């Protein structure tokens, strides 16, 4: 007997409610009472052929507050109001079952029930919501839709006013337009765990985009920008508003790492309206420059959406290691591993101690993860702190440890970059510890475990954090964009470790200001087709194979000074880049 069901617990005092059962529809919605501040969603019974249960908490305008997914490996989700700043008194839980033999849902508006205890008095605040839903069905469809649009406009305006009056916010973007002309001081809680503040759309910029005048040279696979404002037209009538995207949505604070000669993986990030991306995982196929939504391709327990995490690929084991990050007021120190051979996620139960960190750096050396710096939370009312510690994770023993490090180590910071050069040196550049931004550089010798400051010549990059960095060769690496405490940047510099000299490079492709973006290097075949990424051991393999493959940089995501989050894939020829340096 198939006794599979999806249940929800709304608030602390209500019993579980069965939302989906084998003989029911595969889609439903539930109005969350204003008094409820917690929602728990779980399944019970054998899954059979069922694939997953997609869940959304939507606000009054049907905009997602947060999303989640139940799978045979992850059978429970929970949300609390304090975790989601957009959680208001009018929240709807929408769930959709994929796979199995449940009855297909009707495309029209689903029935919305109200979560109320059986003994709830008639005068409770939840009852009017139930009567309102019922009443709408008695009136004409056109009148109902017009009334909904008016209510949505009023709620959107009220939300905009509330957001403008809010003070300190979590995960605040460096490109945020604010009355303050300086970054928040250390006495303010939440200085660096956030990234760019999400802005209201600028009317002039929206008009320019609508006319098609905002174009960037060298961009491949461009998609329309995602806007924070209320879209024109009526909202979709399906409860989940699930749309199959052809490419990732605009975001910042994500990661992008290559896994073979023709594939790179994008994980996580934060986009418009301070919302964590609903499409958190994508696979880039460089052979034909195409994107594939990869979240449903992998099995195993998935992890919460986040920003400020790191993702590092180990070519020896074929695994991606995801560590840390933050989501609103949540901080993470967990390690998740994606096996790219079996496409299965696992969560590591590691021994040893490592604090929750975000906006740290993570480098792979000798099969171990070297985590440096980052932001970590401190008990209220203390300001969040920056770390100057080095932690090493041994994936074979699943243990964290701190090595003995000597020399002149960097000061505490976050949002810095770290490049592994010549298989034994980690070059650390920039970062910030509010209110100070840095443009200094340090070397960690992995053989001696010794830090040393680097004395450089030439025009150095200005102080910055959340910039992009990538190795171009055994002796050169690139620094691009970032945030200086006031604005996003669009300049680019190349550092030569043999001469300890900086060189500024100017290309049209780097004319757009970006912060919180990612850069990797790829190989392009001689016939113009795409090859793969070239960093670390993968680059060594390509060099051994030789052949007519020229390498290019791929730049994805990031936010600018106008609150726009990029979804474009920008391609820059490394040969052209190095040629510009020689001619400068």
Image (cartoon, rainbow, N blue to C red):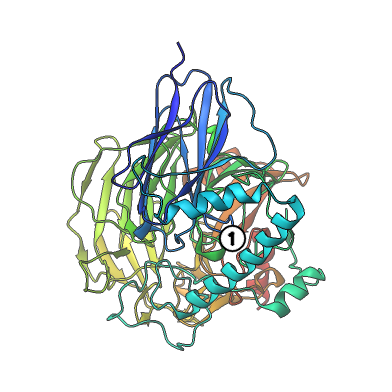
Q: Nearer the viewer, residue 87 or 436?
A: 87
Tell me where residue 287 appears, x and y as whole percent.
Answer: 70, 41
Tell me where residue 522 appears, x and y as whole percent.
Answer: 61, 50
Q: Looking at the figure, which quarter contains the C terminus?
A: bottom right
Query: Residue at position x 47%, y 30% from top?
Result: 299
Query: Residue at position x 45%, y 10% from top?
Result: 1
Q: Nearer the viewer, residue 53 or 158?
A: 158
Q: Nearer the viewer, residue 551 or 123?
A: 123
Query: Residue at position x 55%, y 61% from top?
Result: 271
Q: Secondary structure at mark 1?
A: loop
Tell me where residue 480 appears, x and y as whole percent.
Answer: 55, 69
- Asked if one can make out residue 220 in the rendered structure from this viewpoint, the answer is no
Q: Residue furthest right?
A: 211
Residue 204 vertical position relative to residue 358 in the rendered view, above or below = below
- Give the residue number, with chain letter if any, for mark 1: 557
Query: Residue at position x 70%, y 78% from top?
Result: 203
Q: Residue furthest front?
A: 122
Residue 251 vertical position relative to residue 292 in the rendered view, above or below = below
Q: Nearer the viewer, residue 467 or 253?
A: 253
């Amino acid at each position: 007997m198939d006794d599979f069901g999806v249940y929800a617990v709304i608030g602390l005092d209500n019993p579980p409610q069965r939302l989906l059962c084998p003989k029911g529809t595969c889609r439903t919605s539930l109005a969350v009472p204003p008094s409820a501040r917690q929602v728990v969603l779980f399944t019970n019974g054998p899954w059979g052929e069922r694939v997953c249960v997609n869940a959304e908490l939507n606000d009054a305008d049907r905009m997602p507050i947060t999303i989640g997914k139940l799978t045979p490996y992850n059978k429970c989700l929970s949300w609390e109001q304090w975790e989601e700043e957009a959680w208001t008194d009018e929240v709807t839980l929408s769930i959709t079952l994929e796979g199995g033999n449940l009855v297909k849902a009707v495309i029209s508006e689903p029935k919305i029930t109200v979560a109320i205890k059986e003994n709830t008095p008639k005068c409770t605040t939840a009852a009017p919501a139930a009567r309102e839903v019922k009443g709408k069905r008695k009136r004409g469809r056109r009148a109902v839709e017009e009334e909904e649009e008016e209510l949505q406009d009023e709620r959107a305006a009220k939300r905009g006013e509330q957001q403008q009056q809010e003070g300190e916010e979590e995960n605040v973007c460096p490109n945020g337009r604010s009355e303050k002309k300086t970054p928040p001081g250390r006495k303010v809680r939440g200085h660096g765990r956030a990234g760019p503040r999400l802005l209201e759309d600028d009317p002039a910029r929206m008009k320019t985009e609508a006319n098609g005048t905002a174009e960037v040279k060298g961009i491949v696979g461009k998609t329309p920008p995602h806007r924070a404002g209320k879209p024109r037209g009526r909202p979709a009538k399906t409860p989940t508003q699930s749309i199959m995207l052809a490419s990732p949505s605009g975001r910042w604070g994500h990661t992008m790492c290559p896994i073979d000669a023709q594939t790179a993986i994008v994980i996580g990030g934060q986009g418009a309206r301070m919302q964590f991306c609903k499409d958190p995982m994508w696979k880039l196929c460089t052979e034909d420059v195409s994107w594939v939504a990869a979240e449903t391709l992998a099995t195993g327990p998935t992890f919460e959406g986040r920003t400020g995490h790191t993702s590092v690929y180990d070519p020896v084991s074929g695994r991606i290691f995801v560590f840390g990050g933050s989501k609103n007021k949540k901080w993470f120190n967990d390690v998740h591993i994606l096996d790219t051979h079996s496409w299965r996620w696992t969560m590591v139960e590691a021994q040893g101690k490592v604090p929750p960190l975000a906006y740290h750096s993570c480098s792979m050396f000798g099969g171990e993860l070297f985590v440096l710096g980052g932001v970590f939370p401190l008990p209220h009312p203390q300001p969040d702190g920056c770390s100057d510690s080095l932690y090493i994770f041994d994936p074979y023993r699943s243990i964290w440890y701190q090595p003995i490090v000597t020399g002149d180590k960097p000061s505490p910071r976050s949002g810095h970059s770290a490049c592994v050069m010549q298989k034994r040196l980690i070059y650390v550049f920039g970062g910030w510890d509010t209110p100070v931004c840095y443009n200094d550089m340090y070397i960690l010798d992995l053989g001696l475990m010794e830090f040393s400051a680097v004395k450089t010549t030439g025009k150095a990059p200005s102080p910055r954090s959340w910039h992009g960095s990538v190795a171009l060769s055994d002796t050169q690496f690139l620094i691009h964009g970032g945030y200086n405490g006031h604005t996003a940047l669009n300049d680019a510099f190349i550092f030569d470790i043999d001469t300890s000299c900086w060189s500024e490079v100017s290309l049209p492709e780097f004319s757009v200001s970006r912060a919180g973006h990612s850069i990797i290097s790829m190989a392009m075949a001689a016939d113009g087709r795409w090859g793969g990424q070239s960093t670390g051991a993968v680059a060594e393999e390509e060099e051994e194979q030789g052949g007519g493959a020229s390498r290019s940089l791929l730049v994805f995501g990031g936010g600018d000074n106008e609150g726009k989050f990029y979804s474009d894939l920008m391609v820059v020829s490394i040969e052209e880049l190095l040629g510009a340096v020689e001619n400068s």
